[in-house]
Image: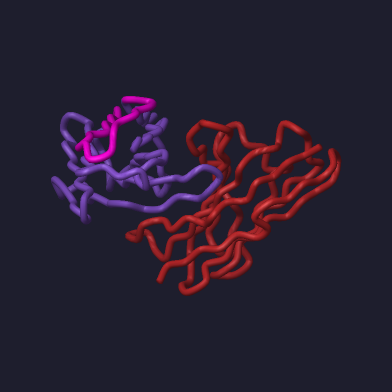
Amino acid sequence: GAVVSQHPSRVICKSGTSVKIECRSLDFQATTMFWYRQFPKQSLMLMATSNEGSKATYEQGVEKDKFLINHASLTLSTLTVTSAHPEDSSFYICSARRDREDEQYFGPGTRLTVT
Amino acid sequence: KQEVTQIPAALSVPEGENLVLNCSFTDSAIYNLQWFRQDPGKGLTSLLLIQSSQREQTSGRLNASLDKSSGRSTLYIAASQPGDSATYLCAVRARTASKLTFGTGTRLQVTL
């Protein structure tokens, strides 16, 4: 139980385009989902927290107009990187949680390369 | 602001050795602490979760301890195997917040 998937696992896009990453909780309903990014050989940095049906809460320094997060259902959250730039190239990982007392379950990550 | 540090940053040991990874955090008002494993280019695998009221958790060859008052946790790996080679991350969840703060990670290599 508690499986989280991400799609796609890898994506290459050109500068200036937008790319959408999906995060799904496969066997549970997630009231809260989290988006992280990880640069090579560095730790995970939280980008934003999203609760189903409400606006995401972004961490300081994360541009909400550039990284659009939608948590439209209890099993799906999406992260859209708009006007992608090479500096946005990174490993993006999502996690999901059933309720406040629960632990976070992590997806396998999405490798984004912007050329 | 919570800061989480892991020492050492990298570690290489021969197969069969017992080893200890360290994690320290600056704010002791935590809800829980979790240890993860990450293989290159992959997501996170949860290893052990210790609630703030607990002192340790064990799973197979892994044992994690928590000393909240001193802001420290250790992950003990017994009889290491080459398959244990990975990056190990600890993460702390604050009592008053939902988010996890991750440590800097320890890259472990177990050699034959």
Q: Residue at x 20, y 37 (%)?
A: B18
Image height of A42 relative to A75, above or below: above
- Residue A12 visible here: yes
Looking at this view, is A57 or B28 the one in front? B28
Please identify the quarter of the rendering in which residue B101 is found: top left
Q: Specify the colour of chain B.
A: purple
Does any portion of residue B93 appear in the rendered image? no
Residue span colored magenta: B8-27
Quadrant in the picture for residue B73: top left
Q: Position of residue A22 (x, y in %)?
A: 65, 60
Q: Per the image, is A68 magenta?
A: no
Where does the image place residue B8, in percent across and percent down from the top left? 33, 25
Residue, x 55% and y 49% (percent of image)? A93
Image quarter of the C terminus of chain A: top right
Residue projecting furthest to the bottom = A27
Front position in the image: B10 or B23 = B10
Give coordinates of residue A35: x percent, y percent. 56, 49
- Does the magenta portion include B13? yes
Left or right: A26, with B62 as reference point: right
In the rendered image, residue B55, in percent from the top left (x then y), is placed at: 13, 45
* Residue drawn at 41 percent across, 44 percent down: B100
Chain corresponding to red in the figure: A
Which residue reaches farthest left?
B55
